[in-house]
Structure formats: C-alpha cells, structure tokens
Amino acid sequence: MKSLKRTRDITPLPSRNFKITVDDQPVEACEGETVLSVLLAANYARVMENDRNVASGAYCGMGVCHCCQVKINAKHKQRACQTLVEPQMSVETLTNRFKEEGIKHD
C-alpha cells in the first residue's frame, strides 16, 4: 500500500516518527503533532462532512469552531486540532455519523 506523501511540512520530521492511517492510507506522523497538522501536511483541505453532507475544512485550528471533526479510532466527531497523534491511530475524513446510521437530518 502506498503511503500518503507529506508535501507541506515547514521543517523536516524528526527521526522518531511512526505511521497512522488516514482514510486507509498510511501517513507519517511524529510525537507531539495533532491529527490536523498531519492532515494539512498530507494536503487534506477538506476533512469533515457536516450533518448536511457538506465538506469543510479546519477554520480556527484551536478547538473553538469544531470544523475539523473527524472519525478517530472509530469515534465520530473528534476534533483533529485538539487530538495528538498516536502510533497505529486510524483517522477517517469526510465521515458522517448520521449517514452511516441511516438517520435523515433535514
């Protein structure tokens, strides 16, 4: 399986890095990074699908706006900007709990 390439890092990753899975693709991460910083480095612009099936991305990047919610380790609506990466972490972007559970949200 091909890894997602990080193309938007400002500085090189330290040598002590590990992989997380983003949308079934491995991507490099390192201790201390947030899920959002990994997503942005891997060029993910749209990370969340809201309850109205509209894709959006991070806005504030500090936990206030809730626009970067993703599914982390099978838990919906986790803030990517507030969650530190861990080895073997699984992240799913553009997920929607209502759609997955067949709940209509009008």
Image (cartoon, helix red, strand yellow):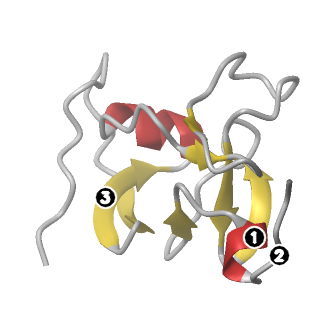
Pointer 2: what residue? 103
Q: Looking at the image, tell me whether mark 2 or mark 3 is earlier in sequence order.
A: 3
Could you tell me which residue is drawn at 53 percent across and 72 percent down?
90
Position of the C terminus by quadrant: bottom right
Q: Real-space Cα distance between discs 2 and 3?
A: 32 Å
Kind of residue at badge 3: Val
CA–CA distance in space, label 3 to label 1: 24 Å
- Check disc 3 and report its element: helix, strand or loop: strand
Q: Which mark is residue 97?
A: 1
**Crowding near the residue tagged with mark 2, few <14, some 14–19, many ≥20 C-alpha atoms within 10 Å:** few
Residue type indicated by callout 2: Ile
Q: Is residue 67 above or below residue 75?
A: above
Vertical comparison of 100 with 63: above or below: below
- Counting residues from the start of the chain, the first of labels 3 and 1 encountered is 3
The image quarter containing residue 74 is bottom right
Rate crowding at label 3 as few (under 14), some (14 to 19) or many (20 or more) other CA atoms within 10 Å.
many
Q: Residue furthest front?
A: 106
- For the N terminus, the image quarter is bottom left
Q: Is residue 48 left or right of residue 103?
A: left
- Please tell me whether residue 61 is drawn above or below residue 94 in the rendered image: above
The answer to whether the residues at label 1 and label 2 have Cβ atoms under 8 Å apart is: yes
Residue at the spot 52% in from the left edge and 56% down from the top edge = 93
The amino acid beneath tag 1 is Arg
